[in-house]
Image: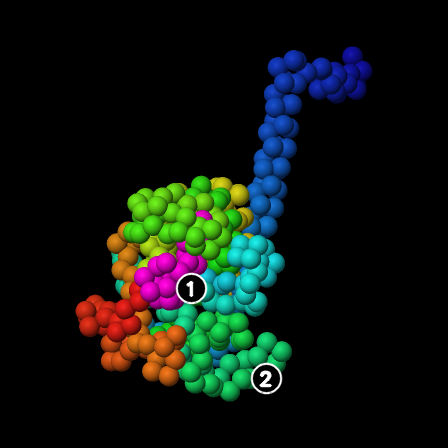
Amino acid sequence: MTENSTPARSRASRRRPRTRGQRVRRALLWTLLVAVVAAGATAYWTYSRIDGNIKAVDLDKALGDDRPPRLPTAGQNLLVLGSDSRAGANAALDGGKVSGARSDTALVVHIPEGRTRATAISIPRDTLVTRPECQKSGGGTAPSARRVMFNSVYAQYGPACVVKTVEKMSGIRLDHYLEIDFSGFKELVDAIGGVTVDIDEPIENGPGGLDLAAGPQRLNGTQSLAYVRTRYGVKDGSDLGRIGNQQKFLMALLGEVKKQDLLGSPAKTYKIADSATKALTTDSGLASLTALSDFARSMNGVDPNSMETIMLPVAYDKQDPNRVVAAEPNASRLWKAIREDAPIPASAKKSPATGG
């Protein structure tokens, strides 16, 4: 035996051909490894794409320190806005008869400490308000103005000015801002398979030829958008008449979202998550899937069916009967109860303008 014979045999034994079982196991291992890497890359791409859909507004930067104090409790206040631009994809949804963008629906949602209930307060779009000084999109500031129609604030100065206007008129610090574009709203409703709404009275020849019989109706995206927009043939035909429809639809939509756990698990259904996030603009604190999911999970104890919906008490304006103004002292009592995280007195829920 030579000096190198043993190492040679060892090297030869290491080069021994693998058995069929070893080759199969090795192939399976590589396949699994590639699958894991591919799945991770796909998940990352999907998350990044959906996450990147969300548009953000930095309220702290836009509004500075001139804001009401935060609630002394763990309660939260959220401004929910439905933006109603009739340009682009939205034009086809209503004939493109109205130019520009407006805040068609505005809700201040108050979530008391404990997060087991919530109150949604609708601000009629035709309400005349005092708009505070706001930043212009091209730079500079616009001075404060009185008797401005509420939904024009968004059109002229954007979401940060709407937040500032609501904070000034209510004395409430808004913790979060959530805006949904109505063309995306249509896609979202279609993606989740529709929303069931109990129609109080038949609606005939509404926007886009909407015709609905009384009773429970499963609405698709186009029907849902027409339903929340319609005012003619509902109560007195004013903006106040459709607020009840908007509140009812919001509750039905939130119930569907919670039932399907869409916000708690936003990436489980790509089509739904993609549709929802494309339609969203939020404050910077909510502008990610992680932040939205965390906020949604913190709201799991709130049952949309038990959410209290209130219209801001308003009265018909004495100078222009087509406009309304906050009715006092009812409106002040309502905002005071929200600021103090206290029960809302019955007197604060009564509105002299009874169109809704």
On the image, the x and y values in percent for residue 263 come to 43, 50
Q: Quadrant of the C terminus?
A: bottom left
Query: Could you say whether the residue bearing mark 1 is in a helix, strand or loop?
Result: strand
Q: Of the residues shown, which amino acid type is indicated by label 1?
A: Thr
Q: Up-down: is 63 above or below 267?
A: below
What is the number of callouts on the image? 2
Query: Could you say whether the residue bearing mark 2 is in a helix, strand or loop?
Result: loop
Q: Which residue is mark 1?
A: 105
Boundaries of the magenta span? 223-243
Image point (39%, 43%), residue name: 218
In this view of the protein, which residue sits in the foreground, 71 or 312?
312
In this view of the protein, which residue sits in the foreground, 146 or 49?
146
Q: How was the colour assigned to the protein in this rendering?
A: rainbow
Q: Which residue is mark 2?
A: 140
Q: Of the residues shown, which amino acid type is indicated by label 2?
A: Gly
When asked about the image quadrant of residue 74, the answer is bottom left
Position of 170 with respect to 98 (left or right) is: left
Position of 39 with respect to 226 (left or right) is: right
Q: Is residue 17 magenta?
A: no
Image point (57%, 54%), residue name: 92
Mark 2 surroundings within 10 Å by alpha-carbon count, few (fewer than 14), some (14 through 19), many (20 or more): few
